[in-house]
Image: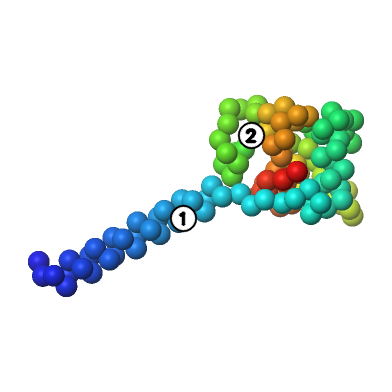
Amino acid sequence: MNAKFLKSWTFFLAVLLLSLNVLAKGKDRIDVIAVHELPREAQQTLTLIKKGGPFPYVKDGVVFGNYEGVLPRRKRGYYHEFTVKTPGTRSRGARRIIAGGDPMSSGEYYYTDDHYATFKRIKE
């Protein structure tokens, strides 16, 4: 093999490995949002979660399965979901807060406004 071929092959492998590393890290990265940046309705839902309710929707507090795999992997039952009211909708809408651990005290909260496609970790 000639030296030019080896340099090209080495460069290709380095770029490929770097690209795979960047893609892998990007999938696990979750953006952060401060409480004061949340919509008013999400702030109200977070307050209700910390108080233990009462919640306006029957499904509030049910186990969130994390089937999309966007949130960190945990045992089933670790995450619970709560509806964030969406003005102008008759249904529950797409907005949710997902709580990890004990919803009232864990401090681990995630916000989604696109029905679980993306999440932001709520920073208090």
Instruction: Write the residue at 22% across / 65% down.
Output: 9
> Would you name the residue on which mark 1 appears?
23
- Tell me where residue 112 appears, x and y as whole percent: 71, 48
Q: Quadrant of the N terminus?
A: bottom left
* Colour approach in the figure: rainbow
Q: Distance between the residues labelled 2 and 1?
A: 24 Å
- Tell me whether the residue at label 2 lies in contact with that at label 1, contact meaning CB atoms closer than 8 angstroms: no
Q: What residue lies at 29% left-to-right and 65% top-to-bottom?
A: 12
Q: Label 2: which residue?
A: 65
| Circle 1 Cα neighbour tier, 10 Å, few/some/many (<14 / 14–19 / ≥20) | few
| In this view, the mark in front (2 or 1) | 1
Q: Is residue 3 above or below residue 50?
A: below
Q: Residue furthest bottom?
A: 4
Residue 18: image quadrant is bottom left
**Is residue 63 at all visible to an observer of this figure?**
no
Q: What amino acid type should be assigned to the residue bearing mark 2?
A: Gly
Counting from the top left corner in percent of width and height, residue 24 is at 46, 51
Q: Please, what is the three-letter code of the amino acid marked with disc 1?
A: Leu
Whichever of callouts 2 and 1 sits on the residue coming sooner in the sequence is 1
